[in-house]
Amino acid sequence: MYPEYMNDSLNKVKETRNKRFELAMTGEHVYPPMSADERQDVLNSSHPDFKSDSRRPVTIGPNKDEILTTEVAEMLETHSRIDPSKFDLSNPDYETDLLIIGAGGAGCGAAIEAMGKGVKSIISSKLRMGDANSMMSQGGMQAAVSPTDTPPTHYLDAIGGGHFDNKPELVRALTEDGPEVVKWLEELGVIWDKVEDGSLRVRHGGGTSRKRMLSSRDYTGAIIMRALMDKVRNHADMINVLEFMPTVELIMDDKGQCAGGILYNLETKEYFTVKAKATIIATGGFGRLHIRKYDTSNHYGATGDGLAIAYRAGAKLMFMDSVQYHPTGAVFPEQIAGFLITEAIRGAGGQPLNKDGELFVWPREPRDIESSAIIRECLENGGGIKTPNGRVGVWLDSPLIEMIQGEGYVKKEFPAMYRQYINYNIDIAKLPMLIYPTLHYQNGGVEIDADCKTNVPGLFVAGEVSGGVHGRNRLMGNSVLDYNVFGRRAGRSTAEYVQTAKLGKLTLDHVNKHEQELKDAGIKTDQISPVILPSYTPESVAKRQLTAHLEGTMR
Amino acid sequence: MAKKEKEAPVQNMATVYIMGKQHDVPAEATIMGAIEYAGYQIVRGAGCREGYCGACGTVYRMPDDHKIYTGLACTTLVKPGMWLSQMPSIPSRKAIYDLDDLTPNTNVFLELYPEVFGCVACNTCTKACVQGLEVMDYIQAAKRGDIAAVMDLSFDCVYCGLCGIRCPAEITQMNVGLLAKLLYGKYLAKESKELTRRLEEVRSHEFDKEYTLLMGMSRQELSDRYYAREIE
């Protein structure tokens, strides 16, 4: 339950609800959408990326002197986990056509498509297969399937949402493949929400000009991920999944081609070498780096590992100055702070409201705009509600959905959200949620083309770790589509690539070069990357962890 | 909102027993928060941390209570005196099949998961479910070949597997539910004619011209078109 002192504000939300309901039913915009200038103003004043210390130039590597998100620049300027001289690459532990790094949606999709072309693969997974942001998507996947919509309309929405920075060929691939992905997933067993005659049920998301959001209740990502995982598990002869074995460096050859990776067994602490004709990085995003100390909606392993290993191998990054904060993360109760509240709540008619129960932004602006408006309302306009733990947030009026869509809708369509709150005696069909933006998505990443190729031969990238698809701001539902579209494309293009690829002598020289660059730049640090897992050890424990040498039987 | 500092003073503490060892942890912590507060670096036993992936299934008992309780460590709050252990992995047999070759009827369960028919209707699985699902009811539905009911009742399953290790008939309920969902999505859901039409349009390159036009536009032209677009 909410603390008593919030009752006044809760009553105001209730008082304004009828008026807001009537306005919503007219079909008019419930609040004026922002113009291009208004959008720029709110980004400048309130988006976390625009704070003075949020970005700085990186001093080494392929993007040297380019402005990146500070925490990303810091991560790239760290040491490797390994000493290359200790590895004998002449006799690799595994040899395969295709190494896929990451077992989320993009990785599994790539393995399935490569298998379809007769190519075997090894998947290196840090946690279990499917422990990934792909699993957590609630609201849905965009695809232009309804008669009022077209793939080019989707293109315009996506590139406008990304402030026209997106790489056009990637946006075309994303939107044009959409309907095929819907069909492909259904063939794999995904249950799409449908209306009576079998048509796919579509909803709005932030920044969509047509209803285009497909869903599977609010377990969309989980249903998709389970179908992909089941397909992978049914073909262990073709796809070898190595769990708790993240890849900590790429291996190159003397011709500058990517030739596999070094895998680290998190439990036995062994390292293994994998020689592969082609490698796909599908490691997902970086929420667990807690950029600007934000809470995150991301899974435990989202530490940007793919960026670190690709960068050392010479891959160029794109748009790594941009971070997505999802407009609606939970801020109360404290135990679920940062948890995602699906954007589909707003798509179904939910509204963000200030402490007076009034709208202050159109509920369906693109994410960066909506988030910035919420931050502005809380930090500059004094419209926020403080929590007992010192956080601040605004209301997200879910009971309004029951009025618009009919009684029982919230519990039926948003079972995961309902369950999340009823644990704390908050019935979101009757009471609004208290929300604030949460660190959600890595907009940029390793630059790719429409075949998922990078500037490093033999190295392919797909999903959240890639850059270019979304420009500097992704729209809702385009990441689920992204991991499917580009995971499949990566699987197909690598399957073709390995037919003619010839590897030379394997080497880890790029790791030595990276260490030399650190030295030349005068960087002194004891940090290493990939980060692998975040640490939540409290200071009171950390100060007693005094082992002098991290060698031997016990740390 | 800045991430909360870990070292913020905590008033209310609770004593819990993590794998039998006593720790004082914040009274309002989740089990996962408590384990990390105590100083453990979790490797197995944490995934999405929001209740979707099922990596953090946990069993616990309370003082002076013989019952076994279950929960997801990420979403279950600690209680004073609880004795808890996370399940790092749950052995379960998943049948191997090609979905394309299956027929959606009772026989599919008989062939792939015959143990379903040994269900003794004890309801222990339902009691063990961290999601509060009617697990036994969907196993009974599987026996009847009612795939739609299995799909619906098992929809919110997070595959923590705790039902399966409590089951006296040794059924792996989560895999039965998954099979039903895949069969439903592939074979029983009504076909979308709109989707079929759209696929034909895409495959016959009907949108090529418009794509070429949009991709050739300057930033300003695109921007003008974007802000002038009609919103459904």
Image (tube, coloured by chain):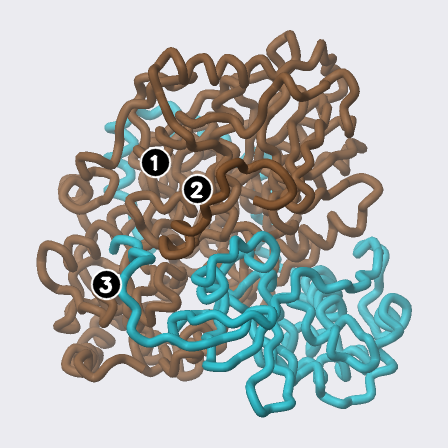
For residue B196, say whether it is visible: no
Q: Specify whether A206 is left or right of A78.
A: left
The chain under label 3 reads A
Amino acid of disc 2: Phe
Amino acid of disc 3: Arg
CA gap, disc 3 and disc 1: 23 Å
The chain under label 2 reads A
Chain A, which colour?
A: brown
Residue A424 coordinates in the image, percent (x, y): 39, 79
Element class at badge 1? helix
The residue shown at (31%, 71%) is A433
Q: Specify whether B224 is left or right of A282.
A: left
Q: Which residue is mark 1?
A: A71
Numbered label attached to residue A391: 3
User: Contact, CB < 8 Å: mark 3 with mark 2?
Assistant: no
The residue shown at (24%, 48%) is A369
CA gap, disc 1 and disc 2: 10 Å
